[in-house]
Amino acid sequence: MSNRESFEELKKKIEQADVVSFDVFDTLILRIVNTPETIFKLVGDVCGIKDYEHIRQEMQQQASMEAEEKWNQPHAVMDQIYDYIKTHSGLEMDWEKVKQTELEMEYDSLVANPEMKEIYEFAKAAGKRVIATSDMYLKKDFLEKVLKKLCVNATLYPCEFGIPEITMHKGEPYYEKGFCKGCCCYDGSNDNAYRM
């Protein structure tokens, strides 16, 4: 089945759904860089931090381990990552400035995924409630700014402090009607009615 045929099938499922949920990254939006880690390398180049791509990845992994052990979080979020870097990297830097540089580069690298934007616009035109979810380390205010930039009007459920406000992609509390590349459709046919 071609992508176009898959999308037409998904549109049929959307017509039957009450709620349509999209993952933010790699579904609604894409990066114009080869990998997310490319941003870390560019930050290192701009801020003059040698091998920052690897330092940033290692510090994020260690910060996430600490967040899981101390606070039972699935991973660390941006502020926690940079607090950990400041404390454990052994490098004297203006880490707040480095963090802001990363956020600016991240923002500039993000574009709408044209295929899923089409699905999003179809769902909105059909009067469906549209939700955007993210399990990234980026905070809600940043993600809202990105969605606004890309003309996406959806209720956002980010992974604040590593704990999702709601997990829509497990098919609860709505019954899952369809799935395609991070897009789920739900209706209220089960007993667990969705609450905003």
Image (cartoon, rainbow, N blue to C red):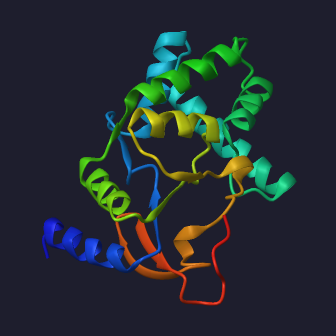
Res 139 seen here: no
Q: Which residue is nearer to you in this view: 152 or 53?
A: 152
Question: Is 22 rendered above or below residue 29?
Answer: below
Q: Nearer the viewer, residue 55 or 10?
A: 10
120 with respect to 79 (left or right): left
Residue 68: x and y in percent read: 77, 55
Q: Nearer the viewer, residue 164 or 49?
A: 164
Residue 54: give x, y in percent of width and height: 54, 32
Which residue shows up at 65% across the image and 89% down it?
A: 191
When the figure is inspected, residue 96 is found, relative to residue 39, above or below; the finding is: above
Classify 48 as above or below 71. Answer: above
Identified at 35% across, 73% down, the residue is 14
Residue 145 spot, x, y in % from top left: 52, 33
Image side of residue 33 versus residue 54, left or right: left
Say which residue appears at 17% left-offset and 66% top-offset: 3
Q: In the picture, residue 125 is in which quadrant? A: bottom left
Write the residue at 44% across / 21% down. Answer: 42
- Does the rendering let one see residue 190? yes
Residue 2: give x, y in percent of width and height: 13, 70
Q: Which quarter of the figure has residue 181?
A: bottom left
Is residue 167 rendered to the left or right of residue 28? right
* Along the viewing direction, whichever of 44 and 136 lies nearer the viewer: 136
